Amino acid sequence: MSTKIIKSIYQLFLLIGFILTINSCHDKVKKSDNIDIKKITYPSDVIPFMDKWQILLGDGTRSKDLIDYEKSDFFYVKNDGDTDWVVYKTPNSGITSPNSSNTRTELGEKKRWIPETGGKLTGTLKVQHVSTTGDARVASSYSVVVGQIHSDEGHENEPLKIFYKKFPGHKKGSVFWNYEINTEGDNSGRFDFSTAVWGYDRSVVGTSPDIYPEEPEDGIALGEEFSYEVNVYEGVMYLTFTSVGHKTVKFIKNLLKSDFSKKEDIPQQVLTTYASKREVGVERENAYAGEKQFFKQGAYNQANGKSTKSETYNGDIAKQYENGSYAEVWFKEGTLGEGIQITTEND
């Protein structure tokens, strides 16, 4: 074989080797690119009912389209090593709704319904943080609302607010729910009646700005999971609260017939909480009958610089997050739908 032919064969092998090397490098780049590209997990991937909600965030941002939507530091997904959670985070001071001093990163149901037709909301959550500053004598200090029914007409009162509250230095906090009367006449005499689930109701407060009551023995710790079910059917609200290691607790409240329509019906808890501040009113006899309602879910921070005297760092959100002046709630499950009939053993 001539030297010329050998040389040509050698050059051909070199060319083939060069092409194979280039292809191999290209494949490695493609594979590396695929590894580096991280798929974003959105809240709507974790809890797929987001199409039924709109949201108000703690910086005043609003959105009506929550599919593939997130906003860092307020509404996003975090994994705790086992589970994806939807995070709702909001500072003590930010931009909020016109009629409130409290910030929120909170879903608001798009649909409206009346108690007679009803609806159902569930959630499984853990509260990760509440404000560490406030006045212990003020009932809303150190607390966050994690679920609501809100009226959309009349006085726009709230037949349900579900709270989590933990005093500084305590390991365990309280879960309780408030019913706000749909006040007869003007709304100046309105009040909330509070019922404990685990721990205390809202009426248990400190004796001075920084002296707290005893820690509740049956309370819920930060980071401890619990679930609630709110089922309104034919004007009656059925509440169920569950948590591993705690007794399941259930309540029934008629939203069409008031328990507080006469002065003598007003509980002592209410008189003790409100009477020294202002006159306490009564509720209209048919309560919330026929009045448009909607559900809310997330983190409605009850700490602010006004009523609870909580630290706000002049509204600087980054400083508030750095120094414990915020509320943070994680949900891993939730449903929203029609109210269902409750059957009992006697039915």
Image (tube, grey):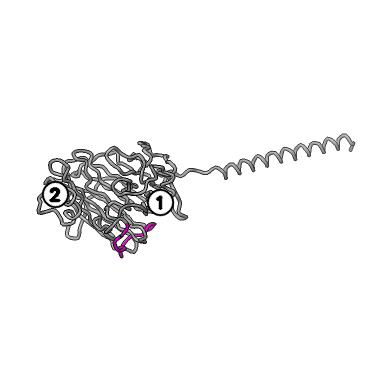
Q: Say which of 242 and 190 sits in front.
A: 190
> What residue does disc 1 label?
324
Location of residue 186 in the rendering, given as x and y in whole percent from the top left corner: 15, 40
Q: Is residue 115 magenta?
A: no
Left or right, 162 with reference to 234: right
The amino acid beneath tag 2 is Ser
Location of residue 211 in the rendering, given as x and y in whole percent from the top left corner: 31, 59
Circle 2: is it few (<14), some (14-19), or many (20+) Cα within 10 Å? many
Residue name at image x 38 percent, y 48 percent:
326
Which range of residues does the magenta coloring cover?
210-224
Cα separation between marks 1 and 2: 40 Å
> What residue does disc 2 label?
258
Q: Say which of 19 and 118 sits in front.
A: 118
Circle 1: is it few (<14), some (14-19), or many (20+) Cα within 10 Å? some
The amino acid beneath tag 1 is Gly
Q: How many marks?
A: 2
Left or right, 22 with reference to 40: right
Kindly indicate the quadrant of the structure image that contains residue 215: bottom left
Location of residue 102 in the rendering, given as x and y in whole percent from the top left corner: 31, 44
What kind of element bears circle 1?
A: loop
Tell me the quarter of the image containing the N terminus: top right
